[in-house]
C-alpha cells in the first residue's frame, strides 16, 4: 500500500474510529445503560460467540446455520428477479411497441411499496422461505428491469449508426452493439437489486421463521439482546458489501466485461 | 451490395464537374424535420441537387445548421429524404451498409472494444476469414501509426488517436465511398493538420470517393478535389469550385497564392451565410408552424 492510499484510508477511517471511541466512552462510564447501548467489547464478544461458539446461548456458534438459510433465500430471490428483469428489460427496451403494452403496468405496480406485499405474500406463500423469496424477487426485479430497459433503449445512436454502416444486420446489432453498450447499466441494476435483496431478506424473515439472520434479529429483540442486535446489523451490512464486491468481480473478471 | 434496393433508377443527364460517371447523386432533395411536440416543421434542404463523380474528394462547407450533415446522413442511409432521390451508382439508397464507410465527428468507437477489435468489427460482421482480416487490421493500424496501441481501449487514447482508429475501422471494409462528418472538428489545430495530411496520403494512394463535411474553409480547400459551399437553411448549393492545387499536398500548400486567394473568397461567402443564418430569427430559417 503506497502512502497516498494509506492517507486516504486514514481519512476514511477517522470518523468510524471516533464514533467507536465515543461509543466506548459513554457506555463504559455508565452514562448510557447497557441494555440500551452495550459497550463495543460486549458486541465484539457476542459476535465471536455467534461465529465460533463458547457460551450456552441459543445462537452460540450458529452463524453458519443462520447465514446459509438467509443466503439461500437471497440467492433464490435475486436470481428470480434477475431472470425476469434482464430479459424483460431487453425486450421492452429494444421494442417500444411491445413496451407500450407492458411498461405502464410495471410503472404503476412499482408505486406500491415492497413492504405492502408482505400480507398478501404470507397468504400466498405462508410463513418462511416462499414469502422471503417472493419479496426479494419483487424488490430486486424493479431496479434490474428498469436499469436494463434504460441501458438498452438509450444506447448512443451514433454507435448504432456505426454498427450498421460497418455491416451489422438488425439482428446482430443486438448482441454486438446494444447489449455491450447497455452492460454497465445492467450491472448497476444488478448491484442495486442485490442490495434490495438483503433488505427484503430481513423483511421476509421478520415473519417468524426459525433460522436466518433476519429471523435471529427479530428473536434478539424479543429477548432484549442488544449486543446481538447491533452485531447482526453489522454482519448483514458486511455481507451486503461482500456480495456486491463478489458480483462486481464476477462480472468484470470472469465474464470479461468492462464497467467503465 | 447491401442496403440498396435493386431497382435501377433511369440515368438522367445531369450537369457534372467532369466526365466520370456519378458515384453519388442527390436529385432535387427536400428534407423536412417535423416536430410533433412543437407543431413545427423545419426545411433543412430545399430542392438540392449534387452529383459526386467517382474518385472525387468533395468537401462540403456551410454555416451551422445548413443541412450539410443531413446530406451525409441521407447518403449514409441513416435518414430518408422527404422528396427527391439519393442514388449510389444509380441505385436508390434505403439503409446504411458496408459499401459506405462512415467516420463520425467523435465518440463513435465502441468503448468496450480495444483498438484492434474496433477495427475488426466490420470484417467480423461480414463473416470474413479471421486470418485475412487480422493481417489487414495490422497493416491498417500500422498505416495510421497505432499498431503499438492495438490492445488499448478508446478511453485510453487521445482525441486524434481515436479518430485515426475510426478511419482505420471504416477503411478495412474497403468501402468504395467514404463519408466523413466533421471528423477533425474536435481536435486541436496541430493534430488536425497531421490528421489531414494522413488522410490525404491514404486518399492519394487509393483514390476512393469521399464526401467530407466541414465548417473549416481551409480544411476543405486543403483536402478536396472539389469544394461545395452551401447556403444557410434551407440548404442550397451556392458555389462549386474545383481545388486545382498540386498533389501530393502537404502543409506547405497553405502559403500557395492560389490557395490564399480562393480561401479568402470562400471564407467571405461562408461568412455572409453565417450572418444571414444568425440574423434570421436566431437560426429558425425555414421553420414553419404545421397546421
Image (tube, coloured by chain):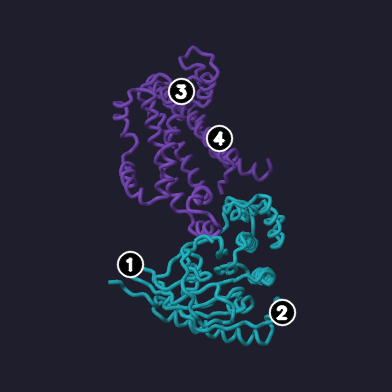
Q: Note the chain letter of the cyan one.
A: B
Q: Nearer the viewer, residue B49 or A71?
A: B49
SS at mark 4? Answer: helix
SS at mark 3? Answer: helix
Q: In whole angstroms, how far apart are the C-alphas of marks 2 and 4?
A: 58 Å
The color chain A is rendered in = purple
Residue A67: x %, y % from top left: 49, 24
- Chain hosting mark 3: A
Contact, CB < 8 Å: mark 2 with mark 3? no
- Farthest-out residue, top: A56
Disc number for residue A69: 3
Using residue B49 as the reference point, say whether residue B263 is left or right of it: right
> What residue does disc 1 label?
B38
Residue A30: tell me if it is visible. Answer: no
Q: Are marks 2 and 4 on the same chain?
A: no
Contact, CB < 8 Å: mark 2 with mark 4? no
Q: In whole angstroms, how far apart are the C-alphas of marks 2 and 1?
A: 50 Å
Q: From this view, report whether residue A23 is shown above or below residue B107.
A: above
Q: Are marks 1 and 4 on the same chain?
A: no
Q: Are marks 4 and 3 on the same chain?
A: yes
Disc number for residue B252: 2
Q: Nearer the viewer, residue A173 or B9?
A: B9
Quadrant containing the C terminus of chain B is bottom left
Q: Are marks 1 and 3 on the same chain?
A: no
> What residue does disc 4 label?
A246
Residue B99: x %, y % from top left: 56, 63
- Chain hosting mark 4: A
- Residue drawn at point x = 53 percent, y = 80 percent: B229
Quadrant containing the N terminus of chain B is bottom right
Amino acid at each position: 500500500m503506497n502512502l497516498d492510499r494509506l492517507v486516504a484510508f486514514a481519512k476514511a477511517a477517522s470518523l468510524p474510529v471516533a464514533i467507536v471511541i465515543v461509543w466506548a466512552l459513554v457506555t463504559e462510564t455508565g452514562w448510557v445503560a447497557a441494555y440500551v447501548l452495550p459497550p463495543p467489547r460486549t458486541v465484539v464478544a457476542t459476535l465471536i460467540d455467534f461465529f465460533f461458539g463458547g457460551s450456552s446461548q441459543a445462537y452460540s456458534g450458529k452463524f453458519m446455520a443462520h447465514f446459509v438459510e438467509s443466503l439461500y433465500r437471497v440467492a433464490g430471490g435475486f436470481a428470480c428477479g434477475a431472470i425476469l428483469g434482464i430479459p424483460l428489460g431487453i425486450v421492452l427496451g429494444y421494442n417500444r411497441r411491445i413496451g407500450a403494452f407492458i411498461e405502464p403496468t410495471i410503472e404503476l405496480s412499482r408505486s406500491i411499496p415492497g413492504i405492502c406485499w408482505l400480507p398478501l405474500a404470507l397468504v400466498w406463500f405462508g410463513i418462511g422461505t416462499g414469502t422471503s423469496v417472493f419479496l426479494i424477487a419483487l424488490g430486486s426485479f424493479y431496479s434490474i428491469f428498469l436499469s436494463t430497459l434504460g441501458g438498452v433503449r438509450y444506447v448512443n445512436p451514433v454507435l448504432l449508426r456505426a454498427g450498421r454502416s460497418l455491416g451489422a444486420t438488425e439482428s446482430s446489432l443486438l448482441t454486438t452493439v446494444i447489449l455491450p453498450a447497455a452492460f454497465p447499466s445492467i450491472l448497476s441494476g444488478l448491484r442495486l437489486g442485490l442490495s434490495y435483496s438483503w433488505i427484503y431478506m430481513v423483511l421476509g424473515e421478520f415473519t417468524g421463521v426459525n433460522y436466518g439472520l433476519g429471523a435471529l434479529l427479530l428473536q434478539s429483540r424479543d429477548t432484549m439482546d442488544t449486543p446481538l442486535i447491533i452485531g447482526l446489523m453489522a454482519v448483514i451490512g458486511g455481507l451486503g458489501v461482500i456480495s456486491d464486491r463478489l458480483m462486481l468481480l464476477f462480472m468484470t473478471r470472469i465474464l470479461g466485461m468492462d464497467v467503465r | 451490395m447491401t442496403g440498396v434496393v435493386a431497382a435501377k433508377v433511369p440515368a438522367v443527364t445531369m450537369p457534372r464537374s467532369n466526365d466520370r460517371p456519378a458515384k453519388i447523386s442527390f436529385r432535387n432533395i427536400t428534407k423536412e424535420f417535423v416536430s410533433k411536440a412543437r407543431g413545427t416543421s423545419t426545411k433543412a434542404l430545399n430542392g438540392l441537387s449534387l452529383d459526386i463523380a467517382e474518385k472525387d474528394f468533395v468537401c462540403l462547407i456551410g454555416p451551422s445548421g445548413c443541412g450539410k450533415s443531413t446530406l451525409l446522413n441521407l447518403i449514409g442511409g441513416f435518414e430518408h429524404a422527404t422528396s427527391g432521390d439519393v442514388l449510389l451508382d444509380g441505385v436508390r439508397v434505403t439503409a446504411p451498409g458496408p459499401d459506405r464507410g462512415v467516420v463520425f465527428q467523435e465518440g463513435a468507437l465502441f468503448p468496450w472494444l480495444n483498438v484492434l477489435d474496433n477495427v475488426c468489427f466490420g470484417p467480423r460482421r461480414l463473416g470474413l476469414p479471421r486470418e485475412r482480416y487480422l493481417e489487414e487490421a495490422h497493416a491498417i493500424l500500422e498505416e495510421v501509426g497505432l499498431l503499438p496501441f492495438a490492445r488499448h481501449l478508446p478511453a485510453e487514447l487521445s482525441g486524434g488517436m481515436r479518430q485515426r482508429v475510426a478511419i482505420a475501422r471504416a477503411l478495412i471494409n474497403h468501402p468504395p465511398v467514404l463519408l466523413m462528418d466533421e471528423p477533425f472538428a474536435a481536435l486541436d489545430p496541430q493534430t488536425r493538420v497531421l490528421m489531414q495530411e494522413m488522410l490525404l496520403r491514404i486518399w492519394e494512394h487509393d483514390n476512393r470517393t469521399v464526401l467530407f463535411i466541414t465548417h473549416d474553409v481551409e480544411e476543405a480547400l486543403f483536402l478536396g478535389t472539389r469544394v461545395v459551399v452551401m447556403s444557410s437553411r434551407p440548404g442550397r448549393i451556392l458555389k462549386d469550385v474545383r481545388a486545382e492545387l498540386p498533389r501530393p499536398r502537404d502543409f506547405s500548400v497553405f502559403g500557395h497564392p492560389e490557395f490564399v486567394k480562393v480561401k479568402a473568397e470562400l471564407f467571405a461567402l461562408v461568412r455572409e451565410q453565417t450572418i444571414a443564418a444568425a440574423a434570421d430569427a436566431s437560426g429558425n430559417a425555414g421553420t414553419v408552424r404545421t397546421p
